[in-house]
Amino acid sequence: MNMVPGLTKIIFLLLLALATQAQDAGTLNNELQRIPGKYFDGLEKKAKQYIRNIDCKTENTLVKLSRWENKIRAILKRVNPEATSLLFSEGRPTFTTVLQEIRNGASFAGQYPAGYNKYLDDVTTRLKYLAGQDSNLTKKATTLVNDLDVLAAGEVKAEAIQQFIETRRKELVEQALRSVGKNRYLSKIDKETYYYSASLKNYREIFSDPTKTEEIIAALLGKIPAFKKFAKQHSLLSGLFDISPQNGRLDPGLQTRVGVEQLIKGRLAETVGQASGAMNKNLQSAQAQLINIKSRLKEGGTNSELPGFKPNDQKTKTFGQRIEYTASIRFAKSQHWLPQGTDIAFGVGYRLNDRSLVGFGASYLLGIGNIGNIHLSTQGLGIRTYADWKLKKQFFITGGLEINYLTMKSLHQQLPATRGFYPSGIWQKAALIGIMKKMNIRTGWFTSTNVQVLCDLFSRRHVLVSQPVLFRMGYNF
């Protein structure tokens, strides 16, 4: 299979097609043979990572819920044996039994269907079309379609478990509150249920975010009339609405209320009035629910069933989403218009919660010289740890510990010789604390910029001359 090493050729062909409004399906079909391998590899990687995230989160959640459920069982057994027998009767699903079923490979689909996933439907439709266009694409596209079918089954399974967790949580809360009142284990179950639901939503959003390659392929296929016809007849959405020439085609997107109502009137002519009334009633109910959701969001996104609970949104994110890469630069004491040295540092931080971040990094002290003698040289190296805590709005309290190794060149400039020779280097510690202000200044490289004003608590202990107050420019990317 001829693979284009990059996306340059495909982008050029796409722009050419858009510029000339080409409608030659044969030419565009020929270009499908040059689809880059990274398109298939990227989809495969995303699908496998999505399933891993769901499976890992599901098992970890059920392990915690099972542990807390057993704690509640022990408490109820002492104060209300009848409630215990009801909640943990033989054959009744519990967090523990469901966890065991999942570990044994049970499907656990139940009666809870997963919602419609437009991104998954679109990708599957494209792959099915590609599989039938060229023999070189058939094997890879078919394999990916099978992987996406497994992924769809995983979504159904996760939806079923999510619904079960919510049902079981309500059972435990209802019985336990009657017998023992509020306790910390019920609170833990409530919070973990919230985090599980929010995590699944986040994983789905990550998976449904198309890459640049996917956008290019989608645009390229969108120029082919044969693909448009194929999508209308074979997509999951068309199956849900039974879109076919004899039944009357719907537009490619989701229909408006008027369009759906007309379809209902055409098929249920004898009960038009009832259908219209039922639809209006359902729309009013949906609007009321939407207003309720909006009011919850205005309250700060807290769970109405957990008064005072402020979720830590970082717990719903993947490890990669909680990692933050930073860079900073500081100019050392200047001489003759130019800085004597520039401290350049890079760090990796991990978000503990929405307000706090901890990290570590390394720094490099670059000597510049002065206006009369510009000379680049290595003046030292260092390692550091840091922590940020949000104070208010875009202001943060920041600080950390650093240890820097200053080389012989930097020592010659500040430290006198001892008995006729200079030391080869020296370690110098710093304890910093100060204020950081984040600014929404973005570039092609950085997502945000910050200014730091730091006080070095160890400045007077240093053998070499050092600044007690440091100014740094920081960048996030």
Image (cartoon, rainbow, N blue to C red):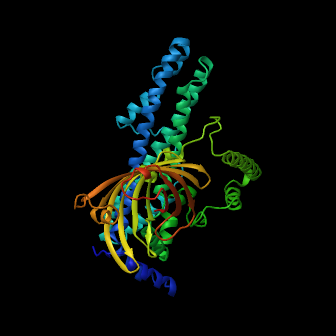
Q: Position of residue 384 (x, y in %)?
A: 38, 52
Asked whether, in this view, residue 262 is left or right of residue 450, the answer is right
User: Which residue is at the far front?
Assistant: 419
**Residue 31 visible in this rendered orientation of the protein:** yes
The residue under the point 39% across, 33% down is: 101
User: Which residue is at the far bottom?
Assistant: 20
Asked where in the image residue 466 lies, by quadrant, the reply is: bottom left
Q: Position of residue 373 (x, y in %)?
A: 35, 79
Task: Pick the residue in front: 111 or 169.
Answer: 169
Asked where in the image residue 6 lies, by quadrant, the reply is: bottom left
Q: Relative to 95, say whether 378 is above or below.
A: below
Asked whether, in this view, residue 192 is left or right of residue 382, the answer is right
**Residue 386 visible in this rendered orientation of the protein:** no
Task: Pick the residue in front: 214 or 441.
Answer: 441
Q: Tally the numbered discs.
A: 0
Task: Pick the residue in front: 93 or 337.
Answer: 337
